[in-house]
Image (cartoon, rainbow, N blue to C red):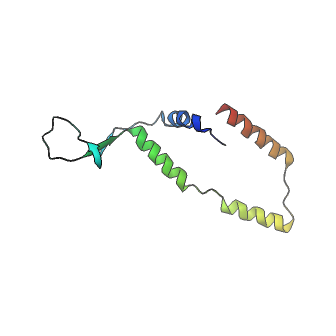
Amino acid sequence: MKIPDQDIGRHMEKALSGLKGPAKPLEGKNAKPATEQSPAPATDQVHISGKARDVQRLNQLVTEVPDVRAGKVEALQKQIAAGTYGADGRAIAEKMVESTLLDKVL
């Protein structure tokens, strides 16, 4: 399923809307101090919202998912080589229609 670029922010927001968490301070080179009134030594800190951390976690999970399911490809290659592979035209057409409808909805 393809999500158009202009809608990706809306879909990510919708997916993350139920996830919550307190902001976590992180140290960083260009960060602002946590409080302006603190006489503490000059240290840089960054506070990342729960949603930002969730987006980072989702991006990491997406990059870990393989683009190709090797086991399924291998099984299909064996069926094709043995001459036992039979494509169900009706099932393929139904999946194409379903995918097209979902793309239009999302």
List x then y, in percent, for residue 2: 65, 42
Q: Is residue 5 visible?
A: yes
| Quadrant placement of the C terminus | top right
Quadrant in the picture for residue 100: top right
List x then y, in percent, for residue 40: 14, 44
Residue depicted at 56% across the width and 37% down the height? 8
List x then y, in percent, for residue 98: 74, 38
Direction from residue 3 to residue 45 in the image, left or right: left
Quadrant in the picture for residue 49: top left
Quadrant in the picture for residue 93: top right
State the residue lying farthest toward the front. 30
Direction from residue 105 to residue 54 in the image, left or right: left
Query: 66 or 41: nearer the eye?
Result: 41
Residue depicted at 86% across the width and 63% down the height? 84
Residue depicted at 84% across the width and 68% down the height? 82
Query: 100 or 15: nearer the eye?
Result: 100
Direction from residue 98 to residue 16 in the image, left or right: left
Q: Is residue 27 visible?
A: no
Residue depicted at 77% across the width and 42% down the height? 96
Answer above or below: position of 50 versus 72: above
| Quadrant placement of the N terminus | top right
